[in-house]
Amino acid sequence: MLGIDIEQCDRFTDWATGKLKRIFTENEINYATKQQNVSQHLCGFYCVKEAVVKATNNKTIKFNKIEVLHEASGKPFINKTQYVSSILNGKDVEISISHTANFAVAVVQIN
Ligand SMILES: CC(C)(COP(=O)(O)OP(=O)(O)OC[C@H]1O[C@@H](n2cnc3c(N)ncnc32)[C@H](O)[C@@H]1OP(=O)(O)O)[C@@H](O)C(=O)NCCC(=O)NCCS
C-alpha cells in the first residue's frame, strides 16, 4: 500500500501551541523548532500523516498519534506505537520526506 502527499510550507507558519498539538506530537514540535526553517519540517511531517491516510484508506486516523522520529543518520521513521500498529494492522511502514522552502512531500509505503 502506497500513499503520497505534497503541501505548501507556508500553511504551517505561526501556529498557536494548541493548534500545533492537535496535529503534531511533542517530539515533532521539538525537532522542527530546532531547525532553521520550522514550517518546512512541520509541513513534511504533515505530509507523512496525510500519506498514511491515503495508504491505509482510513480517514479516522488521529494525526497527533502518528509520530515521525529520526534515526541518528537523519532517516525518518514512524514511531511504532500500539495505535500505529492497530492502524497498520501490524504491517511494516517506510517513509521518505523531501522539502524546498515552498513545498514538502512525503511518500509512505506499507508492506
Ligand atoms: C540526507 C539527504 C539525502 C537529504 O537530502 P536534501 O536534499 O538535503 O533534503 P530534502 O529536503 O530532500 O530531505 C530532507 C529530509 O530527508 C530525510 N533524511 C535525512 N537524512 C536521511 C537519511 N540518512 N536517509 C533518509 N532520509 C533522510 C529527513 O526526513 C529530512 O527531513 P526532516 O528533517 O524534516 O525529517 C542529503 O542531505 C544527503 O546527505 N545526501 C547525500 C548525498 C550528498 O551528500 N551529496 C553531496 C555530494 S556533493
Image: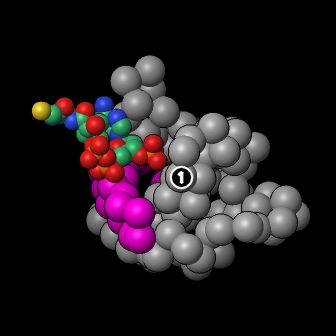
User: Most extreme residue toward the right, as rendered?
Assistant: 18
Q: Is residue 62 visible?
A: no
Q: Pinpoint residue 81: horizontal percent, then vertical percent.
A: 63, 40
Residue 51, placed above or below residue 97: below
Task: Say if the magenta span includes residue 100.
Answer: yes
Q: Quadrant of the N terminus?
A: bottom left
Q: Name the residue type under label 1.
A: Asn
Task: Say if the magenta span includes residue 50.
Answer: no
Q: Is residue 70 visible?
A: yes
Residue 22, placed above or below residue 10: above
Q: Pinpoint residue 47: horizontal percent, then vertical percent.
A: 47, 66
- Residue at the (41%, 63%) spot, across then down: 101
Q: Is residue 55 left or right of residue 62?
A: left
Q: Number of callouts in the render?
A: 1
Ligand 1 occupies quarter: top left
Q: Please, which colouring scheme is shown?
A: one colour
* Closer-to-camera residue (73/87): 73
- Residue at the (41%, 70%) spot, across then down: 102
Q: Please, what secondary structure does the residue beneath circle 1 have?
A: loop
What are the residue bounds of the magenta stretch?
87-111
Disc 1 target residue: 37
Q: Pinpoint residue 57: horizontal percent, then vertical percent.
A: 46, 76
- Residue at the (57%, 60%) spot, across then down: 39
